[in-house]
Image: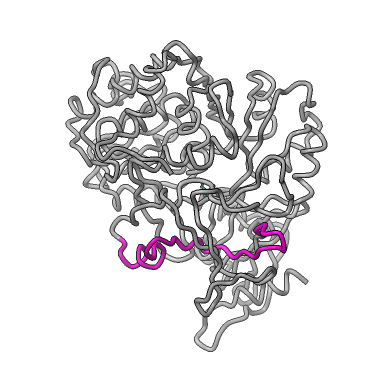
Amino acid sequence: VIDIPRRYNAADDLIGRNLQAGRGSKIAYIDDSGSYSYNELARRVNRCASALREVLGLRQEDRVLMCVHDTVEFPTVFLGAIKAGVIPIAVNTLLTAHDYEYMLTDSRARVAVVSAALLPLFEPLLGKVDTLERIVVAGTANPGEDSLAALLEGGTDDFDAAPTLADDACFWLYSSGSTGAPKGTVHIHSSLIQTVELYARPVIGIAESDVVFSAAKLFFAYGLGNGLTFPLAVGATAVLMAERPTPAAVFERLRRHRPTIFYGVPTLYASMLASADCPTADEMRLRACTSAGEALPEEIGKRWQQRFGVDILDGIGSTEMLHIFLSNRAGSVRYGTTGKPVPGYAVRLIDDEGMEVTEPGVPGELQISGPTAAAYYWNNREKTRATFQGPWTRSGDKYQIDAEGYYIYAGRSDDMLKVSGIYVSPIEVESALIAHEAVLEAAVIGAEDDDKLIKPKAYIVLKPGLEADDALREQLKAHVKRLLAPYKYPRWMEFVDELPKTATGKIQRFKLRAATAR
Ligand code: 3SK
């Protein structure tokens, strides 16, 4: 844990330290449009900060929602807002207009900065969400639309950082839960740099000479650290990719830019290994790989290590804790485990009676204490109190330790699923299914695919007189994809006569999980 002055601005620190170290002409970012030096990034951040304040008239602590693909526009707006004392809210680019309407209404963001391709989802919300004043288009805008490029034109090359404090709200991320709406998770200025000193330097050994590439996007807490905080804190170079992280797209960047650090998620590692076009070790110059989002199956870690001679450091973090607090370390990797606590964080396991579990093999809920915990959930006292309990943050994940103190994932405490590293609420998928005219009831659980990775599986009761067939299955999948972010659709469907329920009518998903595991 490092000492941070009371008066502190995270963006000013992350950019300013590179200019002070004489790294102005070094490449900070490479995206699909070109390369950007630290000097150019600093200029763009200042222009964005000054334009948000002086052109758009935003005040300190106003909020800007960002739905931006991984291009240089993301760090420009994220850091520009922070430098201006305006609070960026980075949201998942894969959601629906309905999700964005909720987040805009909840946050009362006055401005939304949106990648051009996502504009159709946002345009109808201008006028509908009365606190939203303007949409600014990142990328190529059409005549009549406000573009980020024009906004930057209106800014100035120099800008003095807003007088923020280390404990001030800095940015938000939205976190999902099994029930209820996503929660605006408020992080403070000091947290970003703490994740570097606690995790990125000691665990990954990130240094100025590294070129990093994160397949996990910047709007995730995991991707934000990987592709923004960590490289900028040490003066490294980060490769950004706007498109979906398919194996082909990732291979192309690995071959072209030859990063030294690659950050992935288990689903992607599995599909990369299964692809005929997977590069050879010689084509790459990887020296460290990380995985988070969901537990990395042992077999995938071992196959990657054999193929590339580099370990995958599997770890777990959370939106609430900002980055990884439990991780494997180079030289002591144990596949099939999430490693040990990252020094600077305390971790404990709590059983159903509220007692701390210390014996190997006994599961308990993982709770974490550390300096990067979010301050609170916006406008949500009940969930804030349930999650942030004194110095401890409840993760909702169950873990057990083995005889040597390695932590092993033992499932969720609630019914949430993690699909390719993103939380999916079963209730949301069930509601989408029930909205289909053929469905009477539905229950969704997580089931393992051939790579031992979790995907949604639905148990469905059809309306009387209807029969299940392949056409209906495909119709239902398409229906869910239309209503929700497409990654949430059930990969498998089982049609049943009834669902297991409590006496009060609550679905007993644990019974379906037990039946599926058999
Ligand atoms: O999913 C994770 O394990 C994770 C890791 C780092 C930061 C945030 C998250 C959710």
Q: How many marks?
A: 0
| Residue at screen point 29% across, 24% down | 48
Q: Is residue 387 magenta?
A: yes
In percent of width and height, residue 427 lies at: 51, 65
| Residue at screen point 23% across, 41% down | 62
The magenta span reads: 380-407
- 75 left or right of 276 in image: left
How does the figure colour the protein chain or chains? one colour
- Is any part of residue 388 visible from this angle? yes
Taking depth in this image into account, of 439 and 373 the one nearest to the observer is 373
Taking depth in this image into account, of 8 and 227 the one nearest to the observer is 8
Taking depth in this image into account, of 234 and 321 the one nearest to the observer is 234
- Is any part of residue 436 visible from this angle? no
Taking depth in this image into account, of 453 and 406 the one nearest to the observer is 406
- 305 left or right of 374 in image: right
Q: Quadrant of residue 155?
A: top left
Q: Is residue 324 above or below residue 356?
A: above
| Residue at screen point 49% across, 15% down | 27
Q: Residue furthest top?
A: 25
**Quadrant placement of the C terminus:** bottom right
In percent of width and height, residue 327 lies at: 61, 48
**Quadrant placement of the N terminus:** top left
- 348 left or right of 5 in image: right
- 406 left or right of 386 in image: right
In percent of width and height, residue 42 lies at: 35, 19
Q: Quadrant of residue 455?
A: bottom right
Q: Is residue 180 above or below residue 498?
A: above
Q: Is residue 283 magenta?
A: no
In percent of width and height, residue 63 lies at: 27, 41
Q: Quadrant of residue 38?
A: top left
